[in-house]
Image (cartoon, grey):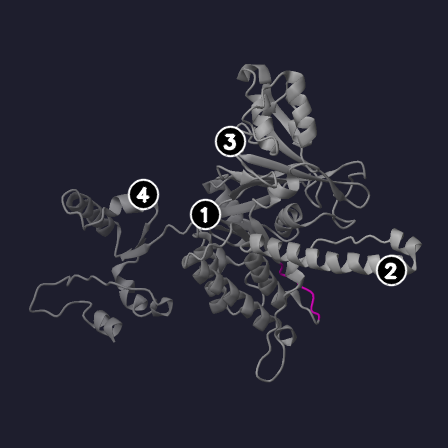
């Protein structure tokens, strides 16, 4: 399952509804304070938070205005585990929107915004007594089926989805009055539905520095969490075994206590909290000089993060069965040498090419932005009224992006051709176009110039020596073609220039 769109309303700077499409790799670029990091944090709130801080709601929005974060998913699995003991098909359960996507909104309400409601926007039955089946218990579903005269013979009456299907299938489809509705699912299927969603991990740029610095800990915590997800069934067995053993000892203790103080024993009852396996395991990294990683410089800690991503890329390439994940990183250039920045970007690109991984990042760095396909860039613009929008990926937006940040995302130019004058341009264009029609290995230079991959530079013959060796600092291939300008046996006019270049 992949994230296709995120929609935000009343969250920090996004008071008006804001929507952003998400690709396998999505690079968010904007000026400072335009809301780049807020997008990543809104997605983090959707996946990982039950409560927002008091400043999470947009300024000017009253306590009665809820904070909505909506995530829309594509490539939804044909079957999901929703009921604890059964799998269901989202299409058959009427859980998908009109585009066949899973659209989920988490709503945070109150003075200190808490997630009070979760909605699924779907094409769902609206007919009376067919529109509320998700909210019913098994006993209530059986009673509803009986009231509607639905025959449950041959239906597994211990599974909610089986009874729901029997009820829905008991009437013609048109009688269900299918229409777009907002299903409130927080108290019904939301918790198990979460298990089918991707894991989301956010690596922030402005991390606190403490004894448990998240810069060093988060990658390892994420690795632990991911490993535990793949062993969920076995962990449940272990948890049940521990619960049974402890419960047996506890009840035996209460029985002994009852012999001495029946009243006190009657007040006691063992209550077990759910196990948080992620807190059972911890990892620390210490160098030979016994200085822990979280005490090293910020650049070293970020370098560890780089290599976490690189290791993750190799793991996914090895097809080790990792679940769907979304990795988000703010400003990967932070505290890093330019070489390391490129290494990290390469790791992120490699990760995004895995069928189970998406990558979100923000950056101010032109070096990184130029390495990313323009279609994967999201340029956030702020209008005079402070409303944010994502600019379209067109030439006009590219110019605005370049002008505002000094970034030119259009990197179609592949070659510069320096010529003496316009006659040389015309000659090269014509002869290459003629030859390209019959020779597959000869490019059409006129077409290349039109498409923007080739640029001619009229230099004039007298400036040739000035250009000799002046491009060597770019470390790009150079080809120099010269004519003699005079017939042999006279020496060529520019014979000295190529000798300087070749030296």
- Furthest residue in direction bottom, as rendered: 289
- Mark 1 or 4: in front is 1
Q: Earlier in the sequence, mark 1 or mark 2?
A: 2
Q: Distance of mark 2 from mark 3, alpha carbons? A: 59 Å
Image quadrant of residue 498?
Answer: bottom left
For the point 7% across and 66% down, which residue is it? 488
Mark 3 Cα shell of 10 Å, populated few (<14), some (14-19), many (≥20):
some
Residue identified by numbered label 1: 374
Distance Cα–Cα, label 1 vs label 2: 72 Å
Query: Where residue 270 appears, x then y in whole percent?
Result: 79, 54
Q: Earlier in the sequence, mark 2 or mark 4?
A: 2
Disc 2 crowd rating (10 Å Cα; few below 14, some 14-19, many 20+) is some
Left or right: residue 501 versus residue 23 is left
What main secondary structure does the magenta stretch of the protein show? Answer: loop
Residue found farthest to the left: 489
Q: Nearer the viewer, mark 2 or mark 4?
A: 2
Residue 203 screen position, x and y as percent: 60, 59
Q: Earlier along the polypeptide chain: callout 4 or callout 3?
A: 3
The residue stretch that appears in magenta:
204-210
Secondary structure category for the residue under label 2: helix
Nearer to me, 407 or 178:
178
Question: Taking 88 as reference, is 36 above or below it?
Answer: below
Label tally: 4
Tag 4's secondary structure?
Answer: helix
Q: Secondary structure at mark 3?
A: loop
* Front disc: 1 or 3: 3
Report whether residue 330 is seen: no
């Amino acid at each position: 399952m992949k994230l296709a769109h995120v929609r935000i309303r009343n969250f920090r700077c996004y008071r008006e509804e804001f929507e952003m499409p998400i690709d396998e790799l999505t690079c968010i670029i904007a000026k400072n304070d335009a809301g780049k990091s807020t997008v990543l944090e809104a997605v983090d709130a959707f996946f990982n938070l039950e409560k927002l801080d008091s400043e999470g709601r947009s300024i000017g929005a009253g306590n009665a205005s809820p904070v909505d974060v909506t995530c829309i998913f594509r490539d939804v699995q044909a079957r999901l585990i929703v009921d604890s003991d059964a799998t269901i098909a989202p299409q058959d359960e009427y859980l998908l929107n009109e585009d066949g996507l899973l659209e989920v909104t988490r709503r945070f309400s109150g003075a200190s915004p808490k997630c009070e409601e979760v909605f699924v926007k779907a094409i769902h039955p609206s007919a009376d007594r067919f529109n509320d089946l998700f909210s019913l218990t098994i006993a209530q579903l059986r009673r509803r089926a009986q009231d509607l005269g639905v025959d449950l013979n041959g239906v597994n009456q211990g599974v909610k989805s089986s009874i729901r299907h029997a009820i829905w299938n008991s009437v013609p489809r048109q009688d269900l009055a299918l229409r777009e509705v907002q299903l409130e699912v927080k108290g019904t299927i939301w918790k198990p539905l979460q298990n089918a969603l991707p894991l989301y991990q956010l690596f922030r740029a402005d991390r606190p520095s403490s004894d448990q610095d998240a810069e060093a800990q988060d990658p390892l915590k994420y690795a632990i969490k991911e490993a535990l997800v793949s062993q969920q069934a076995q962990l449940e067995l272990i948890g049940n075994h521990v619960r049974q053993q402890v419960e047996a000892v506890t009840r035996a203790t209460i029985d002994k206590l009852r012999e001495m103080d029946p009243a006190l024993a009657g007040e006691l009852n063992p209550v077990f909290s759910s196990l948080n396996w992620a807190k059972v395991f911890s990892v620390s990294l210490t160098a030979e000089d016994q200085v822990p990683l979280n005490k090293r410089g910020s650049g070293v800690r970020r370098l560890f993060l780089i290599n976490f991503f690189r290791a993750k890329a190799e793991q996914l390439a090895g097809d080790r069965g990792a679940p769907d994940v979304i990795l988000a990183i703010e400003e990967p250039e932070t505290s890093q040498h330019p070489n390391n920045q490129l290494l990290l970007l390469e790791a992120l690109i490699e990760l995004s090419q895995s069928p189970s991984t998406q990558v979100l990042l923000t950056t101010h760095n032109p070096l990184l932005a130029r390495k990313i396909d323009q279609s994967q860039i999201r340029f956030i613009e702020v209008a005079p009224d402070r409303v944010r929008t994502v600019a379209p990926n067109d030439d006009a937006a590219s110019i605005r992006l370049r002008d505002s940040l000094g970034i030119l995302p259009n990197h179609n130019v592949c070659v510069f051709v320096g010529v003496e004058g316009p006659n040389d341009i015309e000659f090269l264009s014509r002869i290459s176009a003629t030859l390209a029609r019959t020779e597959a290995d000869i490019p059409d230079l006129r077409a290349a110039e039109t498409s923007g991959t080739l640029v001619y530079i009229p230099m004039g013959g007298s400036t040739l020596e000035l250009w000799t060796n002046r491009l060597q600092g770019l470390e790009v291939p150079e080809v120099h073609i010269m004519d003699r300008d005079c017939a042999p046996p006279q020496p060529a006019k520019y014979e000295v220039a190529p000798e300087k270049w070749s030296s």
